[in-house]
Image (spheres, rainbow, N blue to C red):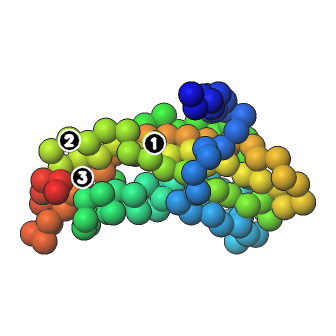
Amino acid sequence: MAEEKPARDRDRHPPDEAPVIRTVAMPADTNPAGDIFGGWLMAQMDLAAGNVAARRAKGRCATISVEALTFLSPVHVGDEVSLYADIVHTGRSSLGIHVEAWRRPREREECIKVTEAKFTFVAIGADGKSRALP
């Protein structure tokens, strides 16, 4: 009998799979207080979700909503930011994608959850209108 793996503590450990995007927060990404600008982080999350959406839809997709983005921890210059994304539902033309952002301070191994949100995308056809998912 296979040994069952314990469930991941979603707020203390990042997902086991590889991140969709991994990047380093740079000085150009800061707000006037010197922390990484929340808009930069949201853009990275949108890129990660968009990548997953385009692969599933086999084509162009557009973000139509973002739900419940709450910042739990600041991101600092030099932090490695990893973004994990997975599809949580599909409709006729839409996809719901859960995204988690985690940071790892440059000199440490510990990962800290920064935020998570659900992004909703719609598959877009050549005519610029929604289309059915394949």
The N terminus - image quarter: top right
Kindly report the distance in space between the C-alpha atoms of the residues bearing marks 2 and 1.
15 Å
- Which mark, residue 68? none
Q: Is any part of residue 66 visible from this angle?
A: no
- Secondary structure of the residue carrying tag 2 is loop
Front residue (pair 46, 134): 134
Q: Where's residue 123, x and y in %?
A: 22, 57
Q: Is residue 17 left or right of residue 132?
A: right
Kindly report the distance in space between the C-alpha atoms of the residues bearing marks 3 and 2.
9 Å
Label 3 near label 1: C-beta < 8 Å? no
Name the amino acid type tagged 2. Answer: Gly
Identify the residue at horizontal 65%, vertical 66% (top origin): 23
Q: Is residue 96 left or right of residue 12?
A: left
Front residue (pair 118, 134): 134
The C terminus - image quarter: bottom left
Q: Which residue is mark 3?
A: 122
Identify the residue at horizontal 26%, vertical 42% (top origin): 90
Front residue (pair 133, 76): 133
Name the amino acid type tagged 1. Answer: His
Name the amino acid type tagged 3. Answer: Val
Label 1 near label 2: C-beta < 8 Å? no
Q: Which residue is mark 2?
A: 91
- Secondary structure of the residue carrying tag 3 is strand
Furthest-left residue in view? Answer: 127
Camera-near label (1 vs 3) is: 1
User: Relative to residue 132, is residue 98 depicted above or below?
Assistant: above
Q: Where's residue 88, x and y in %?
A: 37, 39
Crowding at dot 2, Cα within 10 Å, few <14 / some 14-19 / many 20+, comes out as few
Crowding at dot 1, Cα within 10 Å, few <14 / some 14-19 / many 20+, comes out as many
User: Relative to residue 103, is residue 127 depicted above or below?
Assistant: below
Q: Which residue is mark 1?
A: 98
